[in-house]
Image (cartoon, rainbow, N blue to C red):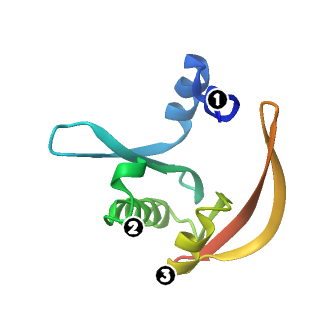
Amino acid sequence: MKDWASCGDSTAHWEDLLSRFHFLVALNAGKQIVGFASVNGEGYLHSMFIHKDWQRKGIASALLSEMESYAGGRGAGEIISEVSITARPFFERQGYTVRKEQRARANRLELTNFVMTKKLQK
């Protein structure tokens, strides 16, 4: 897990992501970040993370809806994302379908994930 998490250690990497993607964060009542998501105008959903203590409270659904609206408002016809094994059922419930299964590398870890897509309503 540390190996995968270390992918986010680079400040330059985050500066690059922030310049290329629209980010939205979810805050709790104490103004602590409990989740975030990012997408670009072409419909690539780059990230979605919800803290384990805040899962199953509608946060992911709300963030995903906002990401879809943002991309759709910029002309994207579909959302595409690389989704983990554990996130796959959530995305399927949201109307996403698996395009392909793949192996992805995160530093030294190799993980199975799924390229999933959803057509957006015009």
For the N terminus, give its image quadrant. Answer: top right
The disc labelled 1 sits on which kind of residue?
Answer: Lys
The residue wearing badge 2 is 61
Q: CA distance from mark 1 to mark 2?
A: 27 Å
Label disc, if present, on residue 121 of the rendered structure: 3
Are the two marked residues, 2 and 3, in contact with CB atoms closer than 8 angstroms?
Answer: no
Mark toward the start of the polypeptide (1 vs 2): 1
Q: Where residue 71 appears, x then y in whole percent? A: 49, 61
> Could you say whether the residue bearing mark 2 is in a helix, strand or loop?
helix
The residue wearing badge 1 is 2
Q: Is residue 61 left or right of residue 100?
A: left
At horizontal 60% and vertical 71% (from top left) the residue drawn is 78
> Could you say whether the residue bearing mark 3 is in a helix, strand or loop?
loop
The disc labelled 3 sits on which kind of residue?
Answer: Gln
Are the two marked residues, 3 and 1, in contact with CB atoms closer than 8 angstroms?
Answer: no
Q: Is residue 19 positioned above or below 25 on the image? A: above
Q: Is residue 40 left or right of residue 33?
A: right
Q: Is residue 39 visible?
A: no
Q: Is residue 75 left or right of residue 27?
A: right
Q: Where residue 7 appears, x then y in whole percent? A: 65, 29
Mark toward the start of the polypeptide (3 vs 1): 1
Q: Is residue 121 left or right of residue 102?
A: left
Q: Where residue 76 appears, x then y in whole percent? A: 56, 65
Which mark is in front, 3 or 1?
Answer: 1
Q: CA distance from mark 2 to mark 3?
A: 17 Å
> Could you say whether the residue bearing mark 1 is in a helix, strand or loop?
helix
